[in-house]
Each structure stands twice: as structure tokens, then as C-alpha cells.
Image: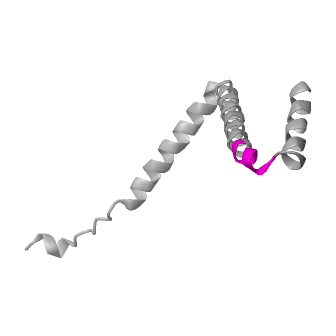
Amino acid sequence: MFYLIVGILILLFYIFAAPPSIRGTLNVVTLVLILVVLLILLTLAAFKIFQLPSELFVTIGMLTLAFFALRDLSRMPVKKKRNKSDKSS
């Protein structure tokens, strides 16, 4: 709650009181803070994914393998059968 209040105060300062010379610096600081928050959220999401049951990862791996196997089978060339009359020559 404290950080929310501080953030609102900084936003109000930026909108109403910051001179143009300081706004460029505040833009860079804001961009860095947003990137840090996104990086933290990405890390927490990765931890949450690794807490899933291992059967889920095995299933995803098997489905991926099945997809590539079926794709390779569909790309295989089809051999044409030779007629019996062609064998005698």
C-alpha cells in the first residue's frame, strides 16, 4: 500500500509539477521500473510453471514428438508399385 501511494504521488508530480528538463529523466526511470516489474513477473511465472506436475511436461513432449513424426510421415515420398510386366524386362 505504501508503494502504491508513493507511485501515485510521483505520477501527480510528473503530471502537474515536473519541469520539462526533468521529464526526460523521469521517462527513463519509469521505463526501467516497468522493465524490472515485467522481469519479476516473468520470473514468478516461470516458478509457477515449474510447480506443475511432471506428467504435464511429459505429455507436452510426447505431443511435440508425435507432431514431428506425423509431419515427417506426410512428407515421405510415395513409392509407385511396379507392374509384373515391368519385372520381366
Magenta stretch secondary structure, dominant? helix
Please state the horizontal and vertical placement of residue 87, each as a whole percent of the image: 13, 69
Closer to the camera, 3 or 24?
24
* Up/down of 54 relative to 70, above or below: above
Image quadrant for the C terminus? bottom left
Q: Name the residue located 85 percent from the left edge and 38 percent from the top edge.
A: 10
Q: Is residue 20 magenta?
A: yes
Direction from residue 6 to residue 28 in the image, left or right: left
Which residue: 50% across, 49% down? 67
Residue 28 place in picture, x, y as percent? 67, 43
Give the position of the N terminus as an image quadrant: top right
Q: In the image, residue 7 lies at what x, y percent?
A: 86, 35
Q: Quadrant of residue 53?
A: top right
Residue at the location (74% across, 42% down)?
26
Q: Is residue 2 magenta?
A: no
Direction from residue 66 to residue 79 in the image, left or right: left
Front residue of 81/5: it is 5
Q: Which residues are magenta?
A: 19-25
Is 67 positioned to the left or the right of 40 in the image? Answer: left
